[in-house]
Structure formats: structure tokens, C-alpha cells
Amino acid sequence: MWSDTQAREAVEFYTTTMDNSRITSVQVMKDTPGGDSTSVGFELAEQPFMAISAGPYFKLNPSISLMVLCETEEEIDRLWLALSEGGKELMPLQEYPFSRRYGWIVDRFGLTWQLDWTEEPIEQKIVPTFLFSNEAAGKTEDAMKFYTEVIPNSKIEDVYPYEEGESENPNAKVQFASFRLNGMQFYAMDNGMDTSGDENLNFNEAFSLMIMCEDQDEIDYFWDKMSAVSESEQCGWIKDKFGVSWQIVPEKLDELLSTGTPEQIYNVVQTFLPMKKLDIATLEKAWNDAK
């Protein structure tokens, strides 16, 4: 999750608001294009996330939100109260035909949340949720097929289409769908509203998905399969054919940035900044050269 300057503040708020949550790492990367950038690793309900303060280049929007499945009315009301302070309501917290208590909100840091009180057993507390809008509307099912074919241990679970008259957008096909990527659950839907090209609903780099790779062969595989916009390739970042941003990252990078001396960390950062696809051997050499 991208922020201009508030990543640490936002993460501290999230981890104190949600149960079973904590900050796991804080790394400062000096002399990046956005100045000194701060990367914060954290867990929400024991699920891993990362936030970064790296300058005013991208802003979060509702195209990707976090769905929180709540077990009690008290829990959903408490989270709604905390997240709504200084935020913006998209759908009020109330009963709907699809839920006995649900609400959609943007918090004061720009992150979008959907809260749902469910009686179903909860396997994964927080579910990243895609909203396919504008040119991407109608591509939910194609995207799910693509992702589940490229990423091992993945599958489409449920797809519920719009019935006649339910959508204002003639391109929208999928009202709600669930799928898994490497075992992790995701939700997705076509935007049934007539958004008239609202760019605030387009996917962008402010919310990206990280694929942690064991070796260079894995990096090469995902890069070749998923990168569709050459001008978006930078520092391990790619953009797929649906507009969604991904980071193709070696697991080794976290070790290099967390165990090195300040000189080693600086050298690694300055080495990967001009890269497009990350090269593990070159990063390890930069780390060793600074010993």
C-alpha cells in the first residue's frame, strides 16, 4: 500500500484497531526518487501486508479494497466507528439483501474497506477485493482465469453474474466472485454503476500485490507471464493486461535489506532502483561489495 508520507502512521492505526495485528519490520531506504522512503511490514489478523511512504506519486482508491469478515455485531460496529473517523462513507453500515450488516468506507489514509457481518465460518479474516471499472468492467472473469492459470495452487471458486436489470453498466457481467491465488482468497466484481470514466476507480500502483519468488527462474516466469505494460516496469514492479500492479520480488531481498549494515542496505537500494526486473545475483553482489 503506497502513501506519500503517512505509511508508519497508518500502519500504527491499523494494527491497534484490529485484533491479532502487529508491526513486523520498519526499513528506511535513503535517496530514492521520493527522498528517504520508509517501508513498514505488518500483520492484520495475522495476514501479512506492507506499506511504503515513497512520495506523492500514487493515491489509493476503491479499485482494490480490503473486505473484513466480522463475527459479531459488536466487532463490525467497533471497526466501522474507528475507520470512519475522518473518512468517507461509500455505502452506509446497515442491512442489505446480501448481508444482515455491511458497510463500505474509505478511511482517512485513503484505504478502502468493506465490512461484513457473517454467520459463515471465517477461514480468512481479510479478503482483498477487486472492483473492475471503466475499461476493465466486464473483465473480472477473464482476469480470474488468467491469474489462476499463471499462479500455481490457484482456482476459481464462485461466480455470480448480474441478472437482467441489476447493472447500470452494460459491460458489467460479474456481480460477485471468489477465487484463490496460491491458496489465498480474493473477491472480485465488475462495477455495475455508470462511473462515466472516473479515473479514481482505475487500478494503479498505489495498491499492488507482491509475489515472493524463491529464485531467479521464478522471477523470470512471473515477469514474462504477467508484465503487459513495458513503461510500468520498474524496481520489480509490473502492470498486467487488466491494469493491476504487481511486485515480482525475490525472497532474498528482505534478508539483504534487514540484515545488512547501513552501507550494504544503501548499496542494494541504489542497485535495484534503476532495475526493471530484479536480478538476485546482482543484488547479492552489491550487498557483498559493501562489506
Image (spheres, rainbow, N blue to C red):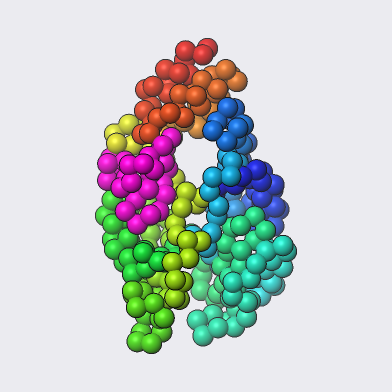
Whether residue 188 sits left or right of residue 96 in the image: it is left
Evaluate whether residue 124 shows in this view: no
- Report x, y in % for residue 146: 28, 57
Figure check: 154 above or below 252: below
**Count of residue discs:** 0
Residue ID at (47%, 13%): 289
Tell me where residue 242 sits by quadrant: bottom left
Whether residue 77 sits left or right of residue 121 in the image: it is right
- 243 or 151: which is nearer to us? 243
Figure check: 50 above or below 155: above
Whether residue 247 sits left or right of residue 38 in the image: it is left
Whether residue 107 sits left or right of residue 57 in the image: it is right
Figure check: 117 above or below 258: below
Evaluate whether residue 16 shows in this view: yes
Residue ID at (47%, 61%): 199
> Magenta stretch?
221-249
- Report x, y in % for residue 231: 36, 41
- Report x, y in % for residue 268: 49, 23
Q: Residue 29 lies in magenta, yes or no?
A: no
Q: Residue 245 lies in magenta, yes or no?
A: yes
